[in-house]
Amino acid sequence: MTFQSASSPEVEVRLTEILWYGRIVDSLDEAHTGKVLLIGCGAARISPDDVLIAVGSRETDTTSRE
């Protein structure tokens, strides 16, 4: 899934991994927290206070245009 920063629209990152108690998981319930791995343009500029907005996945976006 791809995300953009609410405060910096040029920041676009992709969620590649969610780590929860040492295990890689596909998702977490809203009551839980985990460590995420984000890669992409501007990933180094994201701070803990930034709000990320889901903009979809590249695979889905590409497929829908064909």
Image (spheres, helix red, strand yellow):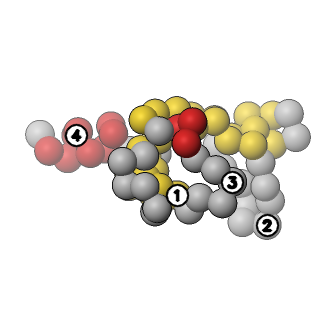
The quarter of the displayed image where residue 66 is located:
top left
> Which one is in front, 66 or 44?
44
Q: Could you tell me the amino acid type at mark 2? A: Ala
User: In what element is the residue under mark 1?
Assistant: strand
Q: Is residue 41 visible?
A: yes
Tell us which disc is closer to us: 1 or 4.
1
Q: Could you tell me the amino acid type at mark 4? A: Thr
Q: Could you tell me the amino acid type at mark 3? A: Pro
From mark 4 to mark 3, how far is it between C-alphas?
Answer: 32 Å
Q: Are marks 2 and 1 in contact (CB under 8 Å)?
A: no
Report the side of 39 relative to 57 (left or right).
right
User: In what element is the residue under mark 4?
Assistant: helix
User: Image point 41% across, 44% down: which residue?
Assistant: 12
From mark 2 to mark 3, how far is it between C-alphas?
Answer: 18 Å
N-terminal label among 1 and 4: 1
Give percent across and percent down for residue 48: 69, 54
User: Image point 75% across, 38% down: which residue?
Assistant: 19
List the single residue furthest toward the left.
66
Q: Residues within 10 Å of mark 4 (few under 14, many from 20)?
A: few
Q: Which residue is mark 2?
A: 31
Q: Which residue is mark 3?
A: 48
User: Image point 36% across, 48% down: which residue?
Assistant: 10
> Which one is in front, 63 or 44?
44
- Image mark for residue 63: 4
N-terminal label among 2 and 4: 2
User: Image point 53% across, 38% down: which residue?
Assistant: 43
Q: Could you tell me the amino acid type at mark 1? A: Leu
N-terminal label among 4 and 3: 3
Q: Which residue is mark 1?
A: 52
